[in-house]
Image: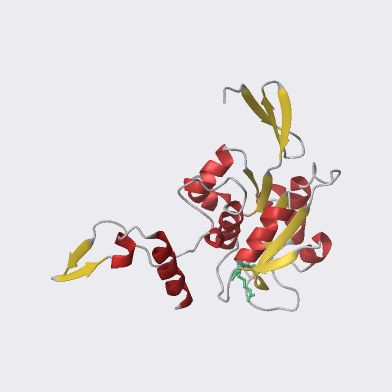
Amino acid sequence: MNASLDHGWSDRGFLLCIINKRVIILPMKNFHIVTIFPEVFETYINTSMMWRAQKEKKVKFNFYNPRDFTKNKHNKVDDKPYGGGPGMVMTAQPILDAVKKALLKVKSQKSQVKIFIFSPSGKKFTNATARGLANKYDHIVLICGRYEGVDARVKKILKAEELSIGDYVLTGGEIPAMVVLDAVSRQIEGVLGNDESLEEKRAASSELYTRPEIIIFNKKSYRVPKVLLGGHHAKIEAWRTKKQKGK
Ligand code: SAH
């Protein structure tokens, strides 16, 4: 197609595309990440599929550092827990102000907004959650906890949901946020290239082989299963399905 193409962001976080002098509005997924360590994300989101998704304006990652919203002299974002106990708790005000800024332009629109606070005791994040988020929401806010967690009033005020990525305790919500960014981005239509595909849309196999056909390691040879070399697609699919069920 020989189309003249230009684009820019609207206030709503939509992508305005001008194709052959016609304005087209494309939906785009806006992620708002609240974290005191935004630099942790840099390499991961600027590599591979996530880099491409940003370049093609399918997703936008916005970062808000609670430290930039503090009102105290030393930009402190934590304090001692009421009632005693170990460690420190993230204070509510800088996080609330960060989220307020993130949603400033969104509030008046009819955009679908979802707010999460990461917590090891939250609802478990699954691929179904990722698919639901990709289909339903225009703006997803991810609040990354640190220390012992976040003042409980943040959840109440923002009507946020607690989200866990698994039954283990990490040091902060940054890795969980990257997990969500990755898993949701790949569910957005057109994000994955031809070489890649969504697991649920094909007979997925976790037992994969590539060249060479024979690997010799410590004098022992390891061959690719014969069925994969024959080019018989039905047989290959059947073998893959069997492998999958055997798990
Ligand atoms: N004291 C807390 C643990 C805090 S861990 C407790 O026992 O529940 C510090 C932060 O890391 C949390 O606030 C949360 O944002 C993040 N975090 C740690 N493990 C996580 C997990 N499995 N899933 C999601 N977030 C997690």
User: Residue reaching furthest right?
Assistant: 108
Quick check: 240 left or right of 142? Answer: left
Q: Note whether 207 is above or below 19 in the view shown.
A: below
User: Is residue 176 in sight in this rendering?
Assistant: yes
- Report whether 82 appears left or right of 128: right
Query: In the image shown, does 190 or 11 lie closer to the viewer?
Result: 190
Assign the N terminus to one quadrant of the image: top right
The percent coordinates of residue 126 (x first, y second) are 61, 67
Reply above or below: 36 against 108: below
List x then y, in percent, for residue 207. 38, 67
Between residue 180 and residue 216, name the one nearer to us. Answer: 216
Judge from the rendering whether residue 74 lies leftward or rightward of residue 223; answer left or right.
right
Q: Residue at x 58, y 64 (%)?
A: 172
Relative to 49, residue 131 above or below: below
Q: Residue at x 73, y 27 (%)?
A: 23
Image coordinates of residue 178 in percent, x first then y, are 56, 57
Residue 13 percent coordinates (x, y): 72, 40
Viewer can see residue 74: no
| Colour treatment of the image | secondary structure
Q: Give residue 93's quadrant in the image.
A: bottom right
Most foreground residue, 222 or 184:
222
Q: Which residue sits furthest left?
A: 219
Ligand 1 quarter of the rendering: bottom right
Name the residue located 86 percent from the left edge and 43 percent from the top edge.
108
- Tell me which residue sits at (78%, 47%) in the image: 103
Q: Quadrant of residue 17?
A: top right
